[in-house]
Amino acid sequence: MNLVVLTSSYPRFEGDGAGAFVARWCESLVARGHRVRVLCFRGPEARGGVRRGVDLRFVPYAPRPWERLFFGQGGPENLEREPGLAALAVPAVAAMFGAALAEVRRERCDRVVGHWVLPGGLVARAVERVTGVPSAIVGHSGGVHALGGLPAAVSARLARAALAGPLTMSSAPLAATLARLAGAPGRGGATPVAPMGYDGPAPEGAPGVDAWRGDGALRVGFMGRLVPIKGVDRAIRAVQELRSAGLDVTLEIAGEGAERRRLERPGGEEGVCFRGHLSGAEKASFLHRLDVFVMPSRRMASGRHEGMPVSLLEAAGVGAVPVVGEVPGVERWLAEPDWQVAQRADELRGALRRVAELKARSPEGYLALRAQTRARVESLCWPAYAARWERWLESPQRGFWDAPGAVAVEG
C-alpha cells in the first residue's frame, strides 16, 4: 500500500517523545513493505526528511513563532493555557487540507489515514470526498474530546462524518462517546478498539523480566507527560503516605512537562526521584526495574479522560504491574482489574500495598502476576501487531481482530 498519514504530532528529532506512538505505527507498516508519507503540523524544532523509511514533511500553518498549537504540552493543554491559540485552528486545517491534496495528487495513494479524529481524521475524510481516495481514521482520546467541546450541532455533524468510514478507537468508552456525539449511540459497539502498540521484548543485555529482587523494596514508576490529567501528584502523595506508614517504597518519575516545576521540591524528596525524559536503553532499564507502573490519571472537569497510554503498555509488556486511575476501558488489558483500577486515594494506596505484600510473602504469586500482566497486552506488541493494522487498512470490512486466537475487543 501507498499511505498518506495526517497527524498533529510526530517526533521532530531523535528521542523526541511527541507523537512517538504514531511514528512506531508508521515504521511498523514500512517494515512490512508499505510506503508511508506523513504530513504533520509544523512546530518548534521540526525538520522533515526520510526517517526510518518514513517520508516526513512538516506543514507550516502560521509564522514559526506562532506555531504553538500542537506541540509542547499537547493540543488540549496548550488551548487551556492559551485559549487564543484556537484562532490558529482554521489556518492549520486549511494548510493540512491543501498539503494533503497536493501529496495525493503528486503520487498515487491507496488510502489517506488521519490520526486523531480532529483534525487529521476529518481532513482525511474531506480529501476522500474531493479525490475519491479512501480514508481511514485512527482515533485517540484528544481528538474525540476536542470534538465534544464544539457546539452540539457542529460536533454531531463532524462525528457523523468520522463514523462514515473505517475508524478505530483506543478504547470502547471513546468509541461510545463519538457515537453519542453523532446522535447514534448504538454505533459505538461496531468500532474496532485498537490502541497503539508498544515495543518489546527487552533489548539484548537488559535485565530479565522475571529477575527476582528479594530486597523487600517496592519500586514504583510513572512515565509520561507531566500534565494535570496524568495525576502524578496522586502517585507522589500515595508514596509519601505509605512511606510514613513504614512501607519501603520508592517512586521514579520519567517525563517532562509544566507540572514538574510544581511537583519537584528543591533538593529532592526522600523516596521520589524525577528522571526527566527517557528513551532507548535508559527507558528500557527504567521499566525493567519496576515492580509497579502507576498511571493515576484523572478525569478533567471538562469530562476529558485518557484513552490507552502507550507507556502503560510498555511497562506491562515487561511485567511491571499496572495500577491505573480514571482511564475508562483499561480493564480489558489488566490481569486483575478489580483492584488494579484505583481511582480513589485509598484504592491507590491499597493496590500498592497489595503488590508489596504479594512480593514479600509469595514470590511465586508475584512472578505469576507479572507473567499474567505481560500476557494481557502481548497482542499489542510491535512488530507482530502491525499485521492486524495492515489487514484492516487493506480490507476494513474484515474486522480488526479477525484472526485465530485474537483477543475479542470490538464493542
Image: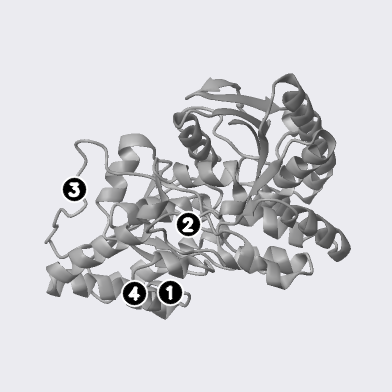
Q: Residues within 10 Å of mark 1 (few under 14, many from 20)?
A: many
Assign the N terminus to one quadrant of the image.
Answer: top right
Between disc 1 and disc 3, whose residue precedes? 3
Report helix, strand or loop for mark 2. helix
Q: Name the residue under label 4.
A: 351
Choose mark 4 or mark 2, whichever is in front.
4
Between disc 4 and disc 2, whose residue precedes? 2
Q: Mark 3 points at which residue?
A: 208
Whether the residues at callouts 4 and 3 have beta carbons within 8 Å, the answer is: no
Assign the C terminus to one quadrant of the image.
Answer: bottom right
Q: Is residue 2 positioned above or below 307 on the image? A: above
Whether the residues at callouts 1 and 4 have beta carbons within 8 Å, the answer is: yes
Between disc 1 and disc 4, whose residue precedes? 1
Q: Name the residue under label 1.
A: 342
Whether the residues at callouts 3 and 2 have beta carbons within 8 Å, the answer is: no
- For the residue pair 157 and 206, the one nearer the viewer reads as 157
Report helix, strand or loop for mark 4. helix
Q: What's the CA distance linking mark 1 and mark 3? A: 28 Å
Q: Name the residue under label 2.
A: 263
Q: Is residue 121 positioned above or below 23 on the image? A: below
User: Taking 346 as reference, is 58 left or right?
Assistant: right
User: Residue 406 sits in which quadrant?
Assistant: bottom left
